[in-house]
Amino acid sequence: MRIDKFLKDSRIIKRRTIAKEACDSGRVYINGKTAKAGDEVKPNDIVEIRFGNKNLKIEVLNAKENVSKAEATEMYKIIE
């Protein structure tokens, strides 16, 4: 699954366009490498997102599409 779609489907970022902008501006990393909006994310990947002065580090647990709001938090585990 694309990283921008994952961030939107997991409800970490509300809109896919904002997720794409975050990726394009270099604020999203997959396994320590700067991510582009089209980069694929797989289970066990470590994703780091920088929101201004706040950092969020998560581990991807699953990357399935069309998840409900209740299932969205089961897509990742917060590390930091």
Image (cartoon, rainbow, N blue to C red):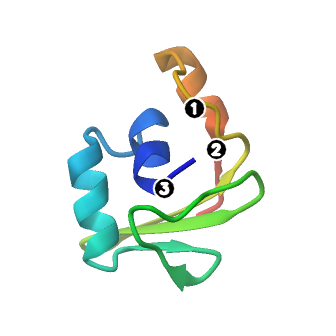
Q: Amino acid at mark 2?
A: Tyr
Q: Quadrant of the C terminus?
A: bottom right
Name the residue furthest front.
Answer: 38
Mark 1 neighbour class, 10 Å CA radius: few under 14, some 14 to 19, many 20 or more: some
Mark 2 falls on what kind of element?
Answer: strand
Q: Is residue 45 left or right of residue 24?
A: right
Q: How many marks?
A: 3
For the residues bearing labels 2 and 1, Cβ distance under 8 angstroms:
yes
Percent from the top left, x then y, of residue 5? 43, 44
Tell me the distance, in whole angstroms, between the alpha carbons under discs 2 and 1: 6 Å
Mark 2 neighbour class, 10 Å CA radius: few under 14, some 14 to 19, many 20 or more: many
Camera-near label (1 vs 3) is: 3
Q: Amino acid at mark 3?
A: Ile
Percent from the top left, x then y, of residue 62? 71, 40
Q: Amino acid at mark 1?
A: Thr
Instruction: Name the residue beneath numbered marker 3.
Output: 3
Instruction: Name the residue beneath numbered marker 2.
Output: 76
Q: Residue at x 28, y 38 (%)?
A: 14
Percent from the top left, x then y, of residue 66? 52, 22
